[in-house]
Amino acid sequence: MTETLPGRAVDGEQFRRALAAHAAGVVVITAQDEGIPVGLTATSFSSVSLEPPLVSFYVDQASTTWPRLRSADHFAVNVLTSDQGELAARFARKGIDRFAEPTRWRPGPHATPLLSDVSVHLVCLPYATVDVGDHVLVVGLVSEATVHGADRPLLYHQGRFGRFIPHS
């Protein structure tokens, strides 16, 4: 349903506070557009389907990185480890070269930038995009998946990056 329901939606600040209680995994989406690496931090990453293997994330329609990501023929999902909070913060900042030192990366399949020391690399082909509210839902078809070690995820909770501590 896309119609507006006046008086039915919570205000933006209350909504933001409520969602901050939900811990989310952290990824950096990277791509190359016209030979230039681009990337952004996302906490809205999710699996979508096993057959075909699809993943998704959301990006703000006002993102200055989105037009470059949109035109790339492949993108990578870099699943961050618990000690990569600084890297996540770097890819969330505006107006900097996110791929300059101290960022460590290498070109992967199809020249897609792959960040170093992450838990997982997923190389994806763009599959679908849908405008949803003030964001774009991006769905990718996973063409390659490499697991380097998935036991230390970076989480985002209450506006901060942190670690997962399992129950004994």
Image (spheres, grey):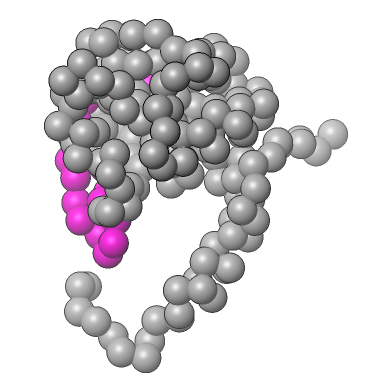
Q: Is residue 40 visible?
A: yes
User: What residue is rendered at 33% in x and 40% in y?
Assistant: 56
**Residue 7 percent across, percent down from the top left:** 37, 91
User: What residue is rendered at 31% in x and 28% in y?
Assistant: 38
Q: Is residue 47 visible?
A: no
Q: How many numbered marks does the figure carry?
A: 0
User: What residue is rendered at 46% in x and 34% in y?
Assistant: 91
User: What residue is rendered at 28% in x and 62% in y?
Assistant: 134
Residue 132, magenta (yes or no): yes
Query: Camera-side residue: 93 or 56?
Result: 93
Query: Camera-side residue: 148 or 90?
Result: 90
Q: In the rendered structure, which segment of residues is drawn in magenta?
A: 122-138
Instruction: Tell me the chief SS of the magenta region.
Output: strand
The vertical placement of 142 against 94, above or below, is above
- Specify the quadrant that holds the N terminus: bottom left
Query: Camera-side residue: 60 or 74?
Result: 60
Q: Residue furthest front?
A: 95
The vertical placement of 31 against 59, above or below, is above
The vertical placement of 146 against 86, above or below, is above
- Specify the quadrant that holds the C terminus: top right
Q: Residue furthest right?
A: 168
**Residue 119 percent across, percent down from the top left:** 55, 20
User: Image quarter for residue 144?
Assistant: top left
Judged left or right of residue 126, residue 148 is right
**Residue 63 percent across, percent down from the top left:** 30, 48
Judged left or right of residue 89, residue 42 is left
